[in-house]
Amino acid sequence: MHKDYFKNKNVLIVGLARSGLASANLLHDLGSRVWITDNQDNESTRLNLGRLKSKEIKVELGVHSRDFVKGKDIVVISPGVSNEALPVVWAKAEGIPIVSEVELAWALSPTEVIAITGTNGKTTVTTLIGKVLEAAGKRAFVCGNIGRPFSAEVDKIGKDDFVSLEISSFQLEYIDTFKPRISVILNLSRNHLDRYRDMREYLAAKKRIFKNQDSADYLVLNYDDPAVRPLADETKARVVYFRREQNLNPNQSAVLAVASILGISKDIVAEVFKGFKGVEHRMEEALKINGVRFINDSKSTTTEATVWALNNLTESVVLIAGGREKGNDYGAVLELARKKVKAAVVIGEAGEKIKKAFSSAVKVEEAVNLEEAVRKSLGLARQGECVLFSPMCKSFDMFSNYEERGRIFKGLVEKLAKEQA
């Protein structure tokens, strides 16, 4: 869509987190009349309220009212908004088009997009693709769920630039014209079953990433994943497979496949891999206290992510896990936990369920909050062992997002280190 399309349009944005704030400011700059509704009235939403570019943007916090929906030309929804949220239900009843923040930004983007989805590894792959592009002399924008929303960057992007975009199943539900030049589906495992009725519905949302692709585009698929490999039969795009290779993990193999499509040499990719220290909140080493390593894996919201983390550790582990329940099968970690986990400390709404799943294999203790969990974990660990904070759950019962959760964990470790000094 041309930028003029949004001039004088009445647009409702549902959600005042990062993507909602970015969408609101972008649309205001384009001359739209903007409304925002968010059922949360807390420190985070009030902070973002102060970051809006204009007082002309009408906002309601702590409630959704139908009057905010009536008469709108478009509704833009943030990734975490449920399909059952009242503004979504009302907009559908009124016949108002609903789009995701990604669709909005895509409509205004002058350049091609590399879009990455999957249950695990999205942030790492999206980051690495951006670094590979930069190493090859390209200007790259790394955005999406990874940090900066697409709509916060789109006014800076030129036609010769590249966008490496992490995209979730939630964002894909409300795309319409979104058409990446390269789509990547990394893997598929149990996730978000608090939102989707079953794995088939979850997969259907992921498949929308290649909905509009044609023979001029590419779809990069994980050959080793039995749920992903058959998608080659459902797309018009050119399919490129990746698989685990010698000396490369699946994430690196996916990046190498994208680089080959773009004509970037293996030598450049290898140099990027060599210098890559990882992403924040994903197997990020915090501090060492009394010979015990503390590792921040707050990005882990699935059992598969925690399995990956445990498989990449050689020492004995005290695991801190828990948060908001999302339909995970914690029993899937049990066999590995017997071998790697000497004790677990559980927190949050899912704590009791994790305790029930783990108690036959490892010692499990409960903590009322993350600070208590950090302290208990140090008491359970011995020199040469590690404490792994890998929640397997959403953050929303205690924190606004996984980044805040990870930062608080690192702060609590620093506090404990000073006490022990």
Image: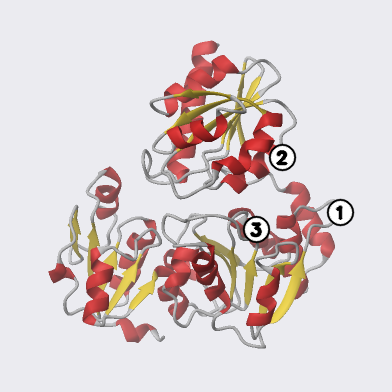
Kindly check if marks 2 and 1 are in contact, taking CB atoms under 8 A apart as contact. Answer: no
Looking at this view, name the residue that lies furthest to the left. 67
Comparing labels 2 and 3, the label whose residue is closer to the camera: 2
Q: Kindly identify the residue that appears in the image at 38 percent across and 25 percent down.
A: 368
Q: Position of residue 261 (x, y in %)?
A: 74, 75
Q: Position of residue 179 (x, y in %)?
A: 54, 80
**Distance between the alpha carbons at the discs numbered 2 and 1:** 17 Å
Q: Which residue is mark 2?
A: 311
Q: Which residue is mark 1?
A: 246
Residue type pointed to by label 1: Gln
Q: Identify the mark nearer the N-term, 1 or 3.
A: 3
Comparing labels 1 and 3, the label whose residue is closer to the camera: 1
The quadrant of the picture occupied by the C terminus is top right
Residue type pointed to by label 2: Asn
Determine which of the numbered discs, if any, sits on residue 125 in the image: 3
**SS for dot 1:** loop
379 is higher (above) or lower (below) than 39 = above
Camera-side residue of 367 and 237: 367
Q: Kindly identify the residue that appears in the image at 60 percent across and 77 percent down.
A: 160
**SS for dot 3:** helix
**SS for dot 2:** helix
